[in-house]
Amino acid sequence: MSDDRTASQGGDSHDDDLHVKAEHDRTGTTIILEGEFDLTGTDRFWAVFRETLAASPRSITLHAHGLTFIDSAGLQALLQARAAATDAGVAFRVSEPSPALRRIAEMTGIEDLLEDE
């Protein structure tokens, strides 16, 4: 069973905005991130993430191949999401990190956030 949802928070739509979509199945939820993940996208991310976590999935996977940019606000949101999932007993991982995400994770010393390839 799959349930696709896209968070949109009003305002003008730009190609570089963060697009967040959740796909649910019996084993867990995959949240697909595309575009620029900065302060303007954190509300969109949290809306989808909180709804996902409230459904008590077995696991949450963030598919991050489509991220073209991520700044400290986006990185902080990912770290807080991992902590929230862990606190709830939900497995959490980031799969297929984009070059932008991999670069900032390496620069900040938090490569453990990323799935091993």
Image (cartoon, rainbow, N blue to C red):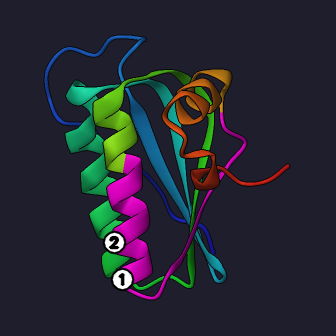
Range shown magenta: 78-97
Image vertical order of residue 36 relative to residue 89, above or below: above
Please report the residue visible at 20 percent of the width from the left and 42 percent of the height from the top.
Answer: 43
The disc placed on residue 87 is: 1
User: Is residue 96 one of those drawn in magenta?
Assistant: yes
Q: Position of residue 26 (x, y in %)?
A: 64, 83
Q: Which residue is mark 2?
A: 84
Q: Position of residue 1 (x, y in %)?
A: 63, 75
Q: Is residue 48 visible?
A: yes
Binning the other alpha carbons within 10 Å of mark 2 as few (below 14), some (14 to 19) or many (20 upward) gives some
Q: Position of residue 39 (x, y in %)?
A: 22, 28
Image vertical order of residue 67 relative to residue 68, above or below: below
Please report the residue visible at 19 percent of the width from the left and 14 percent of the height from the top.
Answer: 12
The disc placed on residue 15 is: none
Q: Tell me the SS state at disc 1.
A: helix
Image vertical order of residue 65 relative to residue 32, above or below: above
Front in this rendered view, residue 10 or 104: 104
Q: Give left or right: position of 86 versus 80.
A: right
Amino acid carrying mark 2 in the image:
Ala
Q: Give left or right: position of 110 versus 71.
A: right
Please report the residue visible at 28 percent of the width from the left and 66 percent of the height from the top.
Answer: 50
Residue contact between numbered discs 2 and 1, judged by CB atoms under 8 Å: yes
Per the model, the C-alpha gap separating discs 2 and 1 is: 5 Å
User: Is residue 32 one of those drawn in magenta?
Assistant: no
Q: Give left or right: position of 96 versus 81.
A: right
